[in-house]
Image (spheres, helix red, strand yellow):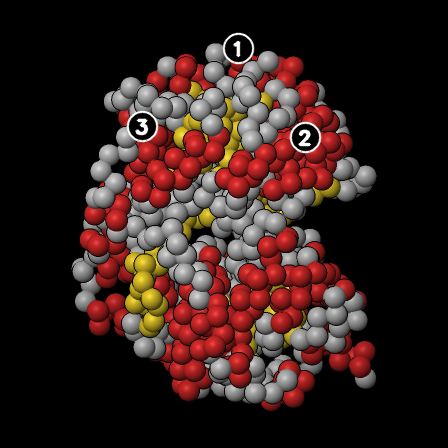
Amino acid sequence: MAGEAYKRSFPVEQRGPAGRQPVTITMAPPSAALTTTLGYPCMGGRRELKTALEAHWRGDLPAEGLTAVLDEVEAANVAAAAAAGVSLVGVGDATLWGPFADTTTRLGLEAPRHRALPAGLDRYFAAARGVPGVAALDMSKWLNTNFHVLVPEIGGEGGATLPPPADAPGWADLVARVRTAQSAIGASRVVPVLLGPVTYAAGCALSGGVTVASLVEAITPSYVAALRALDAAGVPEVQLHEPALVTSDGPALRPVYEAAFAALAKAELPIHLVTYFDDLGDAFPWAVRLPGVSAVGLDFTRGDNLGLLRTHGWPAGVRLGAGVVDGRSVWAEETESAALLDAVRATAGAGVVVCVQPSCSLAHVPLNLEAETALPPAVKARLAFAKQKLDLLVRVAGDAVGDTTSAASTATPGAAVVDASAAITSAIDKALFERAEPFEERRPKQFSVPGGLGTMSIGSFPQTPAIRRLRALFKAGKLPADEYTAAMDAATVECVRLQKETIGLDVLVHGELERTDMVEFFADKMNGVAVTKAGWVRSVGSLCVRPPIIHDDLSRRQVPMTVREWAVAQAAAGDTPVKGMLTGPTTILNWSFPRKDLSREAQAMQLAAVVRGEVADLEAAGARIIQVDEPALREGLPLKRSAWAADVEWAVRAFRLSTTVAAPSTQIVTHFCYSDFSDPDVLAAMNALDADVLTVENTRSGGEAFRALAAAGYSRDLAPGVFDIHSEVVPKEAEVAERVQAFLAKGLEPTRLWVVPDCGQKTASPDLCTSSLKAMVEAAGAARSASKVKAV
């Protein structure tokens, strides 16, 4: 049965080794100037890997079929780079989940609860998604991007022990993939991509006396073995990605880096040390001179690596990787990239070999602009997705860039960013940033559940195949608008009844069934933003999003944007409140591709004005609870703490501008998830938002967020998550009850606590969603009854 479903789901060329069709590669000769890639989107042109992952998780696709699809996607990526004429093609970054998951498996450092499971993909995905009785690892965002990575647990009672086990799988899978690419484009052009040992260690959850230094020391022998195996395979060099160097902790890690790279140098394989997302800062003088390093890649599109290069010079014999093509932007910017490269070459001096490369992996942008047939022509002419960035890279690297006065180039947003801070401060009345009453006065006027421990979901409910099919038919013009609206309204009413009558939630939502994505949905109703048809970017697992492209000043095109659906849900809910559901300005900004000619602060304030208008309209329609989500507030902060203050300030101001229009009796809720919120400055910002209820992902991170908020004395209502929405396991009522009791044990009053999931449940199955929420409601009700008895 599973095999038949497998055959139906995948074309012949995707059905595993026996049915695979070779990828035809039309190779351009390597460019005269040296170029390289650092990574590439790995979901496929038709999101083949997404389809394969979900089929595998359903049991419809065997492991060998899934890995075959990954191989096909990687082969297509190699072919694209070769066809563009890239000199050195990065291979090995394509992944079923992420670099931390892959590296953990290769090192054999799975947590004992996962290592007890059979080796292979079952163990691999158990760590990412959990299985009955076995919790998944925590997740975090990859530095300041929207890509999620696992957080390996090392040391302590529940973490992996050191040294790594002798039977660890090692790096044979990477070597095999490298050899496959070599057979397609030649050994001299294939460069393996590895997550560096220090960045890996810095991204782990360490306990039991394990430190970054001791972990790096323990795993370095495995990395040395990997380099030797790759050297034997005939690669010209290897990329070690070490963005930890550009963080605030980078300079303090100097002894760890120097010891690790001294050991790695013994493998005698040239190392290209790759950094991105910021400059090296105080680490610059020694980081570019680490042992065994023959090339250092720097991001010249962010931070001030050019100024550091001018100040400190460049070591003889080390190639300079010039990241001048922005890997996190969809703007073509050919003229700007060429001018930046000229400046890098002039500053480095004639004796320095310069390799032209993207600023980071191109996995952070969509795959191919050619798939976009509905973008406004004036906007499309200014864009470059991953495939187009390859061509741009090779053009920019040449001695003559070509006609840089073309329409595509001159229309690109200019490099000079308009800093509108002063204008914003003077133009917006400061009173607009304050609620009419302080929290202590307004909270008694707002909705509450007698006895506290009220229950609600975060927002989204499962988007079934039927719902997705309706939306696809409507967008394709095959379903009349009135029929589509009627069908979606019926689904919304059904969702409300499920929450009220079957699950028993205290606060309901309309389910967001009409929304493709929490950012794209709003962008599609605004002026100044373009949405794509196939501009998918991977976020986590099989989940892909289509970040909107901000190209002009922002305002609501559809006014209001959400009130009609909320009203349908509230009518069905009767006297049970339904939350209005909005996405906050900083999250919309961080999960979009912003303009380059206007400051991020100015764009955030424009978005805040949009959200403010919608809050006012929802309230006017009768909504008394409005949720404004800001999960990306933390992830958008710079990688260096010294640069946080200004960004934190305007992010808080943008949220407050969005929400202070609400009357004291209107309860403002916000939500945070899957980032490190334990930092004191971030906690202070969360408090400064002045939301009435703060919901946070909590289960996946082992209660870290709640403990930090409780320790900081957070003074408003709290809603810590009680079950992991990314797990396929229905939580047991006893487990949920235990988590609720842990919240109460911190001394917080039940009336200040809400019981919620970790996040929205858009990607869950309907049965899983319903069963999980019922367990949550039952546990909360029991805890509420027990609290009443204690109070008496």
For the residue pair 277 and 747, the one nearer the viewer reads as 277
The image quarter containing residue 668 is bottom right
Residue where numbered disc 2 is placed: 257
Cα separation, mark 1 vs mark 2, equals 25 Å
**Nearer the observer, disc 1 or disc 2?**
2
Vertical relation: 610 (above or below) 85: below
Which of the marked residues, 2 or 3, is nearer the chain's N terminus?
Answer: 2
Residue where numbered disc 1 is placed: 232
Residue 714 placement (x, y as % from top left): 70, 70
Residue 521 placement (x, y as % from top left): 36, 63
Residue at image point 48% right, 30% down: 348
Residue 743 placement (x, y as % from top left): 73, 66
* Label 2 crowd bin: few (<14), some (14–19), many (20+), radius 10 Å: many
Residue where numbered disc 3 is placed: 399
- Mark 3 residue element: loop
**Nearer the observer, disc 2 or disc 3?**
3
Which of the marked residues, 3 or 1, is nearer the chain's N terminus?
Answer: 1
